Image (cartoon, rainbow, N blue to C red):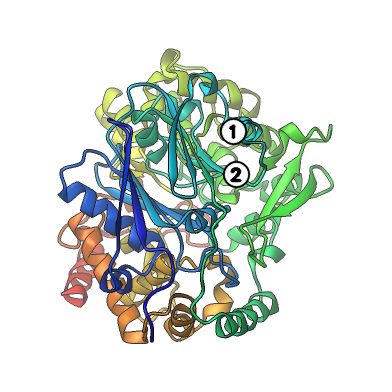
Amino acid sequence: MGMCVGPRSVLVLNCTDRHASSYDLTDDELREAIGGVSVALFVLERAMQAGEDAPLAFASGAFGSTPVPSGTEHAVAGISPVSGRAIDHLAPGHWSALMRRCGFAAIVLVGACARWTTIAIENRKVSWLDARDYLGLPSRDVTKRVREWYGDRSVRVCAIGEAGERESPFATIACDGRSGGRGGLGAVLGAKRVKAIALRGRGDVRIADLPRAERLAEDLRRSVLGGPTMRALSPASRLRERRAVGVPTRNFASADFAPLVDFSRAFEPRDAYVELRAGCAPCSVQCENMYLRKERDRRFAVATDVEGIWALGPLCGIEDGSAVLDALARCEAYGLDAVSTGVSLAFAMEAVERGALSADIHFGDGAALMSNIDAMLRGDGALASIGRGVRAAAITLDRDASTFAMHVDGIESGWDDPRGSTYAPLALALGARYVPRADDRSFVEAEDRATLRDALVLCPFAENAFAHLAETAAPLYEAVWGLEMDVATLHASARATYDRRVRLGARRPHAAHALPARFATPLPDGPHAGARVVESELALMLASYQVARA
């Protein structure tokens, strides 16, 4: 097997002195980190060991800009301003492919700019541009303006909205208008006074064995399209599917959202027109549904995220699907994570209900959703404390507020209620993003599989194509990169990434993160009525996990 032919350079952008440098990953480092989340965490740790403050890392997937389907998301990693621990997530779009065409496996930002800046990267050339005219603009508008400046629609842009500028704990980083990930990494970019990063890559991405890579990729493409994928599941159908496991409602006080069926119909063509499907290139799934309001003005197209729909709808007791769509659009324009926003609003609604907060915000009031989002972001009135996140808000209210503050380590809870689930309590306690299925053989194996998938950046929405992940990925990696790879090395990579997460504080196997107190109380309704998280049982699970990880 020959030398690696893929891009191995890490671009280091020192925002303080507006200087760019780079270093190359060795073959051994690439075998250990593979790509994606694992490379992002690798370069993040290296920057921190060098004494850099609040580095922020972007990494391409192992198969970005190659024929491999469902492998073109990119990873982002940094230290959450909310939890103080490392967080990472995958983001959709074309960023990964462009990063590789510019010649980089990863980009890491350190320091902070003296004034608002757009960083423009064209192949391996870096320019630092004044971004003051972009302040206050949504990421989509920034992307449009940058492309107009270049005169090139192929330019790809990561940007923050007003939430990132204000360093909101809910701020996300959007790529080509699509964003995701809780924990406030958009605030990290905002603290660096970087409004946007633009990539324009025209270089070729060499593939070590192109015929073999194309043959393996075609086999995968048939598998992706031959089984159930997210392409076949609209947000409406996914919402209705949740009824089988419970739909957290009214700040997790209930698991039965009675009007779920009627609510979900607002996200079907009868009421909101699905204009197109979008996705990462060259993904076969194209999972994203873009919704237009009835007036069919393209400026108001909303990229629907089903968990965001839940957080702004059922969790807040809101039955008006149209109001939720408008609230999603508002979150997108600001660059706010819709889940953290919805969970925080639901907390405020319960606080008002209990008399702990005096504000005009109530369960079921869809008409006030957008004005409440505005007030929360801009720190207006009684909702100013809510805009700092559920944990911070609970501290400012009274001691009882912590009993219904739904967060783990300060990051707002997602829609997986652990009551009645085999592995969800352990996953939440550890800070694991992936909740294993009940039929998984062990939590450790399932977690390592998810880590490997995120390193390779193989989309979970095409899970059926990767039933034997390591066995499928090893020859693909060899064909694309030209580095020897086998199943054992891939498993070792997953373990190395786990160890790095522990060092960065993203995993704490020796102590349980405190789960929200509400999860210790029995569910009053829903398919798991009566279920609760028992602290002693969770402690035993954590002890077993620690032994398995030793």
Q: Position of residue 366 (x, y in %)?
A: 64, 29
Give the amino acid at mark 1: Val
Disc 1/disc 2 C-alpha distance (Å): 8 Å
216, above or below 100, in the image: below
Q: Is residue 276 left or right of residue 31?
A: right
Q: Nearer the viewer, residue 233 or 195?
A: 195
- Classify the position of the N terminus by image quarter: bottom left
139, above or below 277, in the image: above
Q: Residue at x 60, y 50 (%)?
A: 306
Q: Nearer the viewer, residue 11 or 409?
A: 11
- Classify the position of the C terminus by image quarter: bottom left
Q: Position of residue 544 (x, y in %)?
A: 20, 73
Q: Nearer the viewer, residue 521 or 186?
A: 186
Q: Position of residue 353 (x, y in %)?
A: 46, 26
Residue contact between numbered discs 1 and 2, judged by CB atoms under 8 Å? yes
Q: Is residue 189 left or right of residue 46?
A: right
Give the amino acid at mark 2: Val
Q: Sequence-wise, which precedes: disc 1 or disc 2? A: 1
Under circle 1, the secondary element is: helix
* Residue 61 tag number: none
Q: Residue at x 46, y 85 (%)?
A: 475
Under circle 2, the secondary element is: loop
Q: Residue at x 40, y 66 (%)?
A: 455
Q: Which residue matches tag 2?
A: 155
Say few, some or many: other residues with alpha carbon within 10 Å of mark 1 (under 14 / 14 to 19 / 20 or more). Answer: many
* Residue 146 tag number: 1
Residue farthest top in this picture: 381
Q: Is residue 339 visible?
A: yes
Q: Is residue 243 left or right of residue 479?
A: right
Say few, some or many: other residues with alpha carbon within 10 Å of mark 2 (under 14 / 14 to 19 / 20 or more). Answer: many
